[in-house]
Image (tube, rainbow, N blue to C red):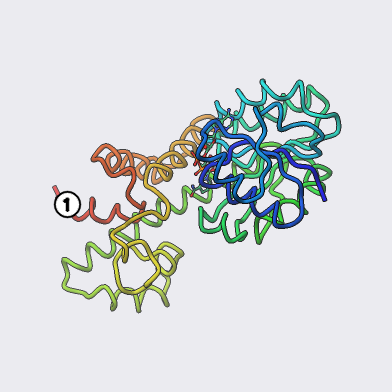
Amino acid sequence: MTQIAFLGLGNMGGPMAANLVKAGHTVAGYDLVPAAREAAQGEGVRIAESAVAALAGAEAVITMLPAGRHVLGLLDEILPQVPAGALVIDCSTIDVASARAAHAKAAERGLASLDAPVSGGVGGARAGTLTFMAGGSPEAFARAEPLLARMGRKVVHCGEAGAGQAAKICNNMILGISMIGVAEAFVLAEKLGLSHQALFDVASTSSGQCWSLTSYCPVPGPVPASPANNDYRPGFAAALMLKDLRLSQEAAQAAGAATPLGAHAEALYAAFEAAGQGGTDFSGIIRYLREMHRE
Ligand code: NAD
């Protein structure tokens, strides 16, 4: 049993903290939003008066926050009070540079740390079936793995500081590009008089096969559980996909990598969001593509 401080009890953090409680750990939590605190309390998380108050006796500190600035800001607030020897784990999806800065801040205090973003969405957080991609020393990873395994099904050590975030944004860049590719194919099929099911039956067993097609099909019918069957309610909101694509393009810019399709995917999702569709599932981009006209 480990004493854990869990900071950020939102859509993802709340159910993740609840799974640690179910596994028998003692979890003290804090969130800025009262409703998030109350929901976590209902799941057995002891709610502290503040982020710093949640740290008392903690052997591990887990953060699950919106973006890099929140993580770095909260670390500045809490690090002086984190008990010596505690492991600091950030599960938020943030930019690689901020993730490395977070590791450096923890190291200044002599604390081991890990960036450990997740894939799998709110459903995966609730079911405890997330995939964790971790960056940090082998020692920090070995200490974190048993805790992460209580919140996820797969835990991958990707390399040193920042490697988890790097894996996350590379994966989601593939996802954004492949969703647009699949959606474009269905739009073209419609214009050619080919049925959705026929394209699905062929492509899902041919070289066009990919997750965006077979697990998250952007048209209703072929994959009954995909958000297309539920009026494109998320799921994974287009605004979050845009966030991850922006992170991938910032990283590509900083690293000098050419990612022309990643850049184009970012531009399309930015236009989709500007059209008021940020809260729509990211597979809903097919509606936007259908409305576009060939020049
Ligand atoms: P969310 O907005 O629901 O939760 C974030 C929480 O952090 C909020 O409740 C907010 O009040 C809290 N917070 C912010 N600053 C804080 C502070 N200083 N102290 C305490 N609490 C603070 O977001 P989410 O959907 O839970 O996502 C969290 C992270 O996980 C994001 O980085 C997101 O990109 C990533 N992620 C989300 C999903 C998803 O499907 N929602 C999937 C994978 C990864």
Percent position of residue 183, x then y: 30, 59
User: Which image quarter: residue 6?
Assistant: top right
Left or right, residue 134 beside residue 187: right
Residue 195 to residue 32: above or below: below
Residue that badge 1 annotates: 291
Residue 283 to residue 83: above or below: below
Percent position of residue 94, x then y: 55, 36
Residue 4 to residue 216: above or below: above
Amino acid at the residue labelled 1:
Glu
Left or right, residue 14 beside residue 85: left
Residue 104 to residue 197: above or below: above
User: Which image quarter: residue 269?
Assistant: top left
Left or right, residue 202 beside residue 24: left
Percent position of residue 264, x then y: 35, 43
Is the residue marked by circle 1 packed among few (<14), some (14-19), or many (20+) residues within 10 Å? few
Q: How many marks?
A: 1
Q: Secondary structure at mark 1?
A: helix
Would you say the beta carbon of the disc 1 residue lies within 8 angstroms of ligand 1? no
Residue at x 66%, y 59% (from the top left corner) = 154
Residue in the foreground of this view, choosing between 142 and 126: 126
Residue at x 40%, y 69% (from the top left corner) = 225
Residue in the foreground of this view, choosing between 11 and 193: 11
Residue at x 75%, y 31% (from the top left corner) = 55
Percent position of residue 161, x then y: 70, 36
Residue at x 58%, y 41% (from the top left corner) = 9
Residue in the foreground of this view, choosing between 117 and 264: 117
